[in-house]
Image (spheres, rainbow, N blue to C red):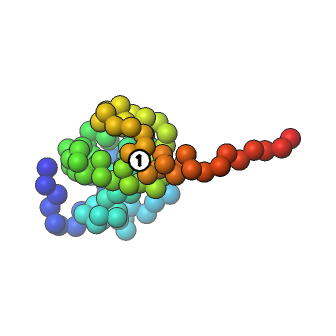
Amino acid sequence: MNVSTESKPVSLQFNKRSFWGLDTQKMDINNPVDADTIIARVMDNGTHEDRAIAVRYFGIERIKQALFNAPELQSTTISFCSLWWSVEPTAFLSYRKKAAEPIQFVSF
């Protein structure tokens, strides 16, 4: 589906819980940086219906692009999308960043 060039608010019909901590009134769904944030938030925190709306609006290829390059994603999102798209978790920047971070040990 093609995205119009007209500025649109984030609401679209997404569940508000996906956007806690963000001022969605200042976000433009047609701005590539904002769209990447919206896609990552919806895939991490949204309902199945939210994800379906994102797929219809942005399309699979745009969602893949956003998630492969997202600096932070939940492990469950990476696992789900890896299975869905038949790709290795290493395709996700977030996964590679987590794998490179040393494990923090807490002394008791």
Q: Which element type, helix, strand or loop, lies under badge 1?
A: loop
Is 91 or 56 nearer to us in this picture?
Answer: 91
Which residue is pictured at 13% across the width and 55% down the height? 2
Say how many tags the image has. 1
Callout 1 amino acid: Phe
Residue reaching furthest to the top: 83
Which residue is pictured at 31% across the width and 33% down the height? 86
- Whether 12 is drawn above or below 53: the answer is below
Which residue is pictured at 29% across the width and 48% down the height? 63
Tell me residue 64's x, y (percent).
30, 47
Residue 17, can we see it?
Answer: no
Residue reaching furthest to the right: 108
Left or right: 56 as drawn, with respect to 102: left
Q: Residues within 10 Å of mark 1 (few under 14, many from 20)?
A: many
Q: Which residue, given by chain and number where applicable, does mark 1 sit on?
A: 92
Q: Where is residue 28, by image quadrant?
A: bottom left
Which residue is pictured at 38% across the width and 45% down the height? 91
Tell me residue 101's x, y (percent).
60, 51
**Quadrant in the picture for the C terminus:** top right
Is 37 or 108 nearer to us in this picture?
Answer: 108
Residue 37, can we see it?
Answer: yes
Tell me residue 9's x, y (percent).
28, 61
Tell me residue 47's x, y (percent).
37, 37
- Whether 37 is drawn above or below 14: the answer is below
Q: Where is residue 53, by image quadrant?
A: top left
Left or right: 66 as drawn, with respect to 77: left
